[in-house]
Image: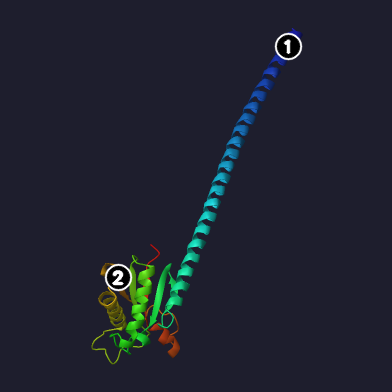
Amino acid sequence: MRFKTIFVRCFLLSLALLSVGCAELKRLREDNLAMSQRIEGLQSERDSLSSRYAMSEREKARLMAEREKMENERRSLEERLKGTGASVSIKGGNISVTLPSSIFFNSGKTTLKDTAKNSLRQVCRVVNTDFPANMIRIEGHTDTDPINRTKELFKSNWELSAMRAANVLHFLIDDCHLDPKRLYIAGFGEFEPVASNNTSAGKQQNRRVEIVVMTNR
């Protein structure tokens, strides 16, 4: 009887140990599966990051090449426009030819000076040669001085700036024969200054017309 009792106890203990061992083995397998899935996830994330980094480097190289190309275009334009009074800059990814209002208009006026027309013709020829199909925005800008002498004609600097831009547009169409479908105007008044309006020199810089070639499309 005693031997039988001992045998039963040993048998039950073996079952208990086996049960514990199976549970532990199951847990180890589950942990191993979770670890494998985690490793696969990390590898996938690494591959994704590597791919995005490669794309980022390619995009960076592309943008740098485009920037260099645009800067070369800007320098070329500026060189060929020497003597016209125009300056050339890059504005929002576009090429902008800036014409001081003092060269093209009398104070508070919108009629183009005769002496300015040759300069504008040269600007037109160069821009049309380099960018024969691009859209062109003609912007008018003023300083912050209120309109006094011609206030019966212009309610604000918005109207003055827009009319100056419109007169440049008509000259480009009528005299330079640009396609009117490529042109449009914008009057900004005093709200896009490039210098301080607290000085005469700053105001003079702010009074301008910009011919913006839309290359960022």
Residue that extends furthest to the left in the rendered view of this protein: 152
**Residue 172: x and y, percent?**
29, 76
For residue 55, above or below residue 73: above
Identify the image quadrant of residue 193. bottom left
**Residue 105: x and y, percent?**
32, 87
Using the numbered discs, state the Cα–Cα distance from disc 1 to disc 2 in whole angstroms: 103 Å
The one nearer the camera, 120 or 144, is: 120
**Residue 35: x and y, percent?**
61, 36
Whether residue 140 can be seen here: no
Residue that extends furthest to the top in the rendered view of this protein: 1
Residue drawn at point x = 53 percent, y = 58 percent? 61
Whether residue 200 can be seen here: yes
Q: Are marks 1 and 2 in contact (CB under 8 Å)?
A: no
Name the disc covering residue 18, or none. Answer: none
Identify the image quadrant of residue 191. bottom left
Name the residue tied to disc 2. 183
**Residue 42: x and y, percent?**
59, 43
Q: What amino acid is found at the position of numbered circle 1 in the picture?
A: Phe
Instruction: Indicate which disc, 1 or 2, sits on the residue closer to the N terminus.
Output: 1
Which quarter of the image is occupied by the C terminus? bottom left
The one nearer the camera, 34 or 192, is: 192
Name the residue tied to disc 1. 7
For residue 31, above or below residue 56: above
Q: Badge 1 local density, few (<14 within 10 Å), some, or many (20+)?
A: few
